[in-house]
């Protein structure tokens, strides 16, 4: 049993965590809880035999398929334009996709994305959304927006656990050599130069969203390399710097620098800063993470417009519209709609099964879209964890683990008792390059396996944590986010995927931007909605 436990921990979290966990033989009771995702089997019905079709059709002006950030952004844009005959269908029991949130007696908490970097520009749909939330307090003399201080992540923001001690920040400065620090400074200077770079048209080389970036070959050629290859080519060999870059790639893209294009790796460090080394105003976050953004989008929609528990299995363009067929997930009852316009706000691997013409003749470019799995676990504690060194922060990273560590859901709450109950949201990107094998590994692990893995990861950093652990809930995201593998971001597949089918079927999802981020989902959702508006014959100023 001990050998099996060690092998399990090593396979998911790495040998350093396995060694540490197996060294501690203190007995403890398992933490009660469970695996809480339920839509995997339902979604996989798309792979099987043709599903039944309803005899009667409902009519609607616009049908949005998918109530993640992209689909809700599309519905939000349509609502602002005064289009009321809109239906949003969602397979899951609630809206939000990977930005959804949960809640218990202690706090709200994220089930996926947990922050939004403060935008640098006072333009675009994300800024419009933040203004609707009263998150924006003004602009500075340079035109950069200013944000409500209560929404910006408060200090301490980040810390790093290494060999028994917590240190401030995400770069391990303790024990760093002069050569390590010199290489870090050289890397930061390169990233600042990339951030300041503009093309002849004034476009940033690396912008948010990616659609606003320069397409000049000087920059896009970086997409042909992995980030690891670029680091080697440029002579960046410090193990500490390599760890930092790997962490960045795992954090935003779900895999290491070996699996990420150099363009994407540089984008992480350059797109959200001004070229002077300042990374915007910071991070905007809430206890429920980006679930707060989902809630704002939902608040703009008419009651009942979003219908959960509906599996859409066919979208068929016809003259003047689309036929959409679906099943109620709970009952299996077939449903069908005739829509003048459709926004398909789901990832390409789902669209491949849903878009009727693609089932008959699958576009080759669909195979270029690859998706990595993630696992997110929320651990409720009766008191904040005790630790040695730098104090508890919002983001708490474990240097020797393959996990990303955890964020503290209650960090942003104004609490008098900083030692009171809390919820830790733990993140594990399944970062291996064989995404199918990683997905199978994630989905095959039992709750008992996940309980052992989460506690093995956290206990070395927090002795006594087991005594305060109240409940653990685990969410598996089998296809959590698109991976920006080399050649994908500036290759033909992503560009082809963005094109509408005729003037009736439009696409929206973060994978169209090549990065699984809220800004990408929001931008493509709004763009698809504006295409649908044009298809309805309505004119409206663009938000993009």
Image (spheres, rainbow, N blue to C red):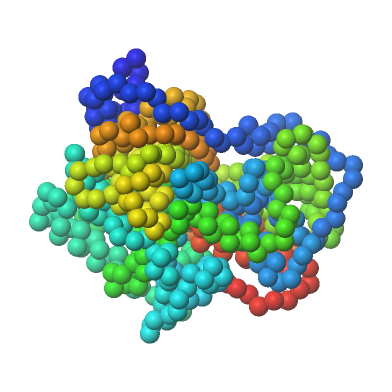
Q: Is residue 476 left or right of residue 50?
A: left
**Residue 171 location in percent, x, y?**
23, 53
Figure quadrant of residue 406: top left
Q: Please identify the residue farthest to the top as the structure is shown.
A: 1
Q: Please identify the residue farthest to the left as the structure is shown.
A: 178
Above or below, 380 relative to 201:
above
Above or below, 307 relative to 181:
above
In the rendered view of the protein, which quadrant contains the C terminus? bottom right
Toward the viewer: 49 or 229? 49
**Residue 268 location in percent, x, y?**
38, 59
Q: Residue at x 27, y 33 (%)?
A: 464
Toward the viewer: 364 or 535? 535
Q: Residue at x 25, y 21 (%)?
A: 25
Toward the viewer: 510 or 173? 173
Q: Residue at x 74, y 54 (%)?
A: 304
**Count of marks placed on residues:** 0
Q: Is residue 81 left or right of residue 295?
A: right
In the rendered view of the protein, which quadrant contains the N terminus? top left
Above or below, 476 relative to 316:
above
Figure quadrant of residue 142: bottom left
Q: Please identify the residue farthest to the front as the structure is shown.
A: 416
Q: Residue at x 72, y 65 (%)?
A: 532
Q: Please identify the residue farthest to the right as the structure is shown.
A: 55
**Residue 102 location in percent, x, y?**
53, 45
> Taking the image as drawn, is residue 392 in sight?
yes
**Residue 135 location in percent, x, y?**
48, 69
> Taking the image as drawn, is residue 227 in sight?
no
């Amino acid at each position: 049993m001990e050998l099996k436990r060690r092998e399990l921990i090593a396979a998911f979290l790495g040998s350093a965590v396995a060694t540490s966990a197996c060294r501690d033989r203190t007995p403890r009771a398992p933490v009660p809880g469970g695996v809480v995702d339920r839509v995997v089997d339902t979604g996989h019905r798309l792979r099987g035999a043709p599903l039944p079709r309803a005899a009667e059709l409902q009519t609607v002006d616009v049908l949005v398929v998918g109530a993640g950030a992209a689909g809700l952004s599309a519905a939000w844009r349509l609502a602002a334009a005064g289009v009321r005959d809109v239906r949003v269908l969602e397979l899951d029991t609630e809206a939000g996709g990977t930005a959804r949130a949960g809640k218990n007696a202690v706090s709200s908490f994220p089930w996926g994305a947990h922050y939004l970097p403060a935008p640098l520009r006072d333009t675009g749909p994300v800024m419009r959304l933040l203004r609707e939330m009263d998150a924006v307090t003004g602009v500075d003399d340079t035109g950069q927006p200013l944000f409500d201080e209560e929404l910006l992540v408060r200090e301490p923001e980040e810390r790093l656990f290494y060999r028994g001690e917590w240190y401030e920040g995400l770069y391990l400065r303790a024990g760093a050599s002069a050569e390590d620090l010199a290489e870090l400074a050289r890397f930061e200077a390169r990233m600042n130069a990339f951030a300041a770079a503009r093309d002849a048209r004034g476009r940033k080389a690396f912008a948010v969203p990616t659609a606003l970036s320069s397409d000049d070959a000087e920059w896009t050629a970086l997409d042909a390399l992995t980030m690891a290859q670029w680091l080697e080519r440029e002579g960046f060999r410090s193990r500490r710097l390599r760890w930092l870059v790997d962490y960045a790639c795992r954090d935003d893209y779900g895999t290491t620098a070996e699996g990420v294009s150099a363009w994407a790796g540089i984008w992480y460090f350059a797109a959200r800063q001004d070229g002077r080394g300042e990374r915007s105003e910071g991070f905007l976050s809430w206890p429920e993470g980006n679930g707060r953004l989902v809630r704002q989008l939902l608040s703009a929609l008419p009651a009942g417009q979003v219908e959960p528990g509906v599996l859409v299995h066919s979208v068929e363009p016809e003259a003047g519209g689309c036929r959409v067929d679906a099943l109620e997930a709970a009952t299996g009852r077939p449903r069908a709609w005739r829509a003048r316009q459709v926004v398909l706000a789901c990832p390409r691997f789902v669209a491949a099964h849903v878009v009727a013409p693609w089932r008959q003749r699958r576009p080759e470019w669909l195979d270029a879209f690859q998706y990595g799995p993630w696992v997110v676990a929320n651990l409720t504690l009766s008191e904040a964890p005790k630790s040695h060194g730098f104090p508890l922060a919002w983001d708490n990273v474990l240097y020797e683990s393959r996990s990303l560590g955890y964020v503290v859901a209650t960090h942003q709450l104004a609490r008098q008792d900083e030692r009171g109950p809390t919820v830790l949201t733990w993140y594990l990107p399944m970062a291996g390059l064989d995404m199918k094998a990683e997905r199978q590994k994630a989905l095959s692990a039992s709750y008992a396996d996940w309980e052992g893995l989460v506690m093995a990861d956290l206990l070395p950093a927090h002795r006594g944590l087991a005594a305060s652990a109240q409940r653990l809930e685990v969410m598996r995201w089998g296809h959590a986010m698109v991976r920006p593998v080399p050649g994908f971001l500036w290759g033909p597949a992503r560009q082809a995927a963005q094109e509408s089918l005729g003037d009736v079927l439009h696409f929206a999802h973060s994978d169209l931007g090549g990065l699984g981020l809220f800004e990408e989902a929001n931008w493509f959702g709004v763009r698809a909605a504006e295409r649908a508006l044009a298809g309805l014959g309505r004119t409206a100023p663009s938000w993009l």
